Image (cartoon, rainbow, N blue to C red):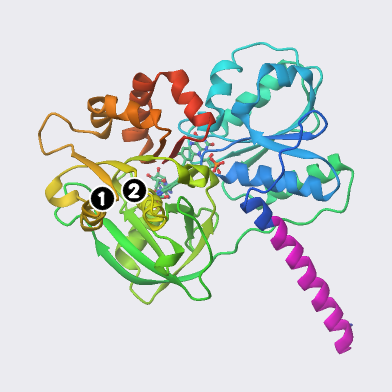
Amino acid sequence: MLSLDPSRWLAVGLALAAYAAVCLIAWRAARRHTVAVAAVDDCWQIVFASQTGNAETIALQSAAALQKAGIAACCYPLNQLDDERLVAGGCFLFVVSTAGEGDAPDNAARFARDCLPESLALARVDYGLLALGDRNYAHFNAFGRRLDDWLEAAGARRRFDRIELDGCDAEGLAHWQHQLLRLAGTTAFVAWETADFSPWTLVDRKQLNPGSQGRPVHRLHLRPSAGLPDWAAGDLAQIVLPAEPERPREYSIASLPADGGIALLVRQHVREDGSEGLLSSHLCRYLQPGESVELRIRPHPGFRLGANGERPLILIGNGVGLAGLRALLAERVACGRHDNWLIFGERNAAHDALLADELEAWQRAGQLRCTTVFSRDGGALRYVQDVLRHEAEALREWIGRGAAIYVCGSRAGMGEAVDRTLADILGRQGLDELADAGRYRRDVF
Ligand SMILES: Cc1cc2nc3c(=O)[nH]c(=O)nc-3n(C[C@H](O)[C@H](O)[C@H](O)COP(=O)(O)OP(=O)(O)OC[C@H]3O[C@@H](n4cnc5c(N)ncnc54)[C@H](O)[C@@H]3O)c2cc1C
Ligand SMILES: Cc1cc2nc3c(=O)[nH]c(=O)nc-3n(C[C@H](O)[C@H](O)[C@H](O)COP(=O)(O)O)c2cc1C
């Protein structure tokens, strides 16, 4: 029977509050990137491959959890791992997602290109591998599987079978945590806390491209029903519908906390069979001002300004990719940095000049150099990659002055072409070096 003794309830309450506080501290530590990168020789090496931050966050949480259990752990992206370090051996935990069409994420692309084709002797490597993917894609967990097979073929010892996550897979993640605990030989493990979804109310919605040949794009403003959480430019909003709780959709946040709420740019999606995209239609058509959606903020460390706040910035994007770029620009303007160059593409100037008033105001104030290009208006230049080629000299000059490049928008239509063009202009090796230095970042979907 339950005791109703108030002092016992108080004790239980205090213990739960203390536990929650510890969880929150661990979660915040992971969010803020504070896991120390120790000397790698004597620590567990937690190596991540991550495009939009999920694998990176889990890797940082894993490192924080091991450190809490008194075990030295360091955490770094797969591109920083080379043959020499692998052959030297040690304990590795790989947390790797799959991007594109079964491809390696950007911060693992060079490893995939240069190391995976090699045959190494890795008998001194012990490892475990967590693969993040989504069964809606044709090549489920392809990169994680490829890396795991390669390690096994090279003679590395698997300490436990590959764990595969399908989307937000709480069971798979719990299994990973259990394996960490077992390997660490500890029970002093603190459960991980992730931010909960909470209701955010639609304040207003406006179509930004009336008359467009493309699908409608709406700007939505949302406010939380509780206090405003913190986030940084580059972060993502995840929204979930009760009908599909296991599949949240992600949207780049277009605003800053100083704006008082979240702004999103959402394009109404149409599936290949002609049916409406579920969540984008809900956001663009059915949700009414005053009604709410379940939303949480997801840090996207790979697309934040970070140290690039001190560099000139080149922002390249198309369509709703302007959302993430707009947040970065707003942060730069707020910090008084005016060496910003936006190269933005859409279809027709008459209908698709998204956020034109704000961009023009920043231009007039000398806070932005803005090059827009419209693919269906005729003219010599049609796409952002054409602008890059045309402006190759200026681009090299900006890079020479230390600029960083941020790309946001469609992966297939724009991201790949921009990547190829930048590699043509700067050399593939030069672009790799920029990526390694955190000066080439992409949020492409
Ligand atoms: C990092 C990131 C940032 C993003 N930022 C933005 C942004 O700022 N703005 C924006 O508009 N979008 C953004 N997106 C895309 C967004 O997350 C959604 O994918 C998009 O809105 C479509 O979602 P939907 O629910 O409308 O479509 P869905 O219903 O999910 O359909 C999308 C696709 O999923 C498949 N699918 C899923 N369920 C079914 C089903 N039952 N039957 C048939 N096919 C199905 C189909 O291939 C379909 O084409 C971003 C994505 C990522 C990954
Ligand atoms: C543009 C895009 C392409 C993706 N391609 C694949 C894929 O080919 N196979 C797969 O299993 N998952 C794929 N995914 C799902 C991601 O692997 C999954 O969302 C993962 O959690 C992302 O982790 P990250 O944030 O660390 O990059 C893709 C996701 C996006 C947005």
Q: Quadrant of the N terminus?
A: bottom right
Q: How many marks?
A: 2
Foreground residue among 301 and 401:
401
Mark 2 to mark 1 CA distance (whole Å)? 7 Å
Give neighbour class at mark 1: few <14, some 14-19, many 20+ (Cα, 10 Å): few
Q: Which mark is residue 366?
A: 1
Q: Which mark is residue 93?
A: none
Q: Which label's residue is closer to the chain start, 2 or 1?
A: 2
Q: Which mark is residue 338?
A: 2
Q: Is residue 152 visible?
A: no
Give neighbour class at mark 2: few <14, some 14-19, many 20+ (Cα, 10 Å): some
Inspect the image, locate mark 1, and give the three-letter code of the amino acid beneath it: Gly
Q: Position of residue 299 (x, y in %)?
A: 54, 52
Membership of 46 in magenta stretch:
no
Residue 46 found in image quarter: top right
Q: Is residue 419 visible?
A: yes
Residue 217 found in image quarter: bottom left
Inspect the image, locate mark 2, and give the three-letter code of the amino acid beneath it: His
Q: Quadrant of the C terminus?
A: top left
The image shows residue 395, relative to residue 6, as above or below, that is above
Over which residues does the magenta segment extend?
A: 2-26
Q: Position of residue 427 (x, y in %)?
A: 40, 18
Q: Are marks 2 and 1 in contact (CB under 8 Å)?
A: yes
The image shows residue 155, relative to residue 330, as above or below, that is above
Seen in the image, is 368 located left or right of residue 141? left
Magenta-drawn stretch, dominant element (helix, strand or loop): helix
Q: Residue at x 83, y 31 (%)?
A: 42
Foreground residue among 74 and 52:
74
Q: Residue at x 89, y 48 (%)?
A: 186
